[in-house]
Amino acid sequence: MLGLEIVKEVYRKERDSYKLDLSLNEQYIIELFSFPSPPKRPSRPEATGLRHLAFSVDSVEDTVAHLAEKGMQTESIRTDEITGKKFTFFDDPEDLPIEIYEA
């Protein structure tokens, strides 16, 4: 089980938005922002700010198969030229890329 805890939630009146700080296993901090009408921003080929999330998996092939069973499409599996590890991408519901990367 992940040790995910809410550290702080702040309403920012001047922006009519919330900022949520999460702690993962007391090691990582994740900041989430909400805005009532955020502008659409391009995510490819690169973007300022958060480009994408990446998740480490034991088997990229098994994860791709699992996603396919759920109706998700992924890009072709590629190999990182530097590490020799497999990876691929799929899109979240807002069309932002999510990477799965071999552990």
Image (spheres, grey):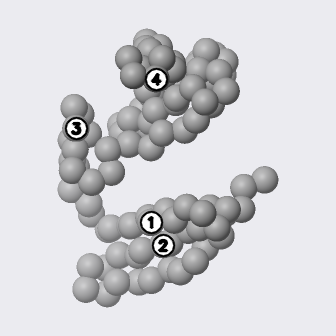
Asked whether residue 74 is in view, the answer is no
Marks 1 and 2: CB-CB under 8 Å? yes
Which quarter of the rendering shows the C terminus? top right
Of circles 3 and 4, the one toward us is 4
Of circles 3 and 2, the one toward us is 3
Q: Amino acid at mark 2?
A: Leu
Q: Under tag 1, what secondary structure?
A: strand
The answer to which image quadrant residue 82 occupies is top left
**Image point 42% across, 74% down: which residue?**
19
Mark sitting earlier along the chain (3/2): 2
**Image point 21% across, 56% down: which residue?**
39
Q: What is the crowding at mark 1: few (fewer than 14 residues within 10 Å), some, or many (at least 20)?
A: few
Mark sitting earlier along the chain (2/4): 2
> What residue is disc 2 on?
20
Between 49 and 42, which is closer to the camera in this rendering? 49
**Image point 49% across, 62% down: which residue?**
30
> What residue is disc 4 on?
83
> What residue is disc 3 on?
46
Residue 75 horizontal side relative to residue 41, left or right: right
Marks 1 and 3: CB-CB under 8 Å? no
Q: Under tag 4, what secondary structure?
A: loop
Residue 80 horizontal side relative to residue 7, left or right: left
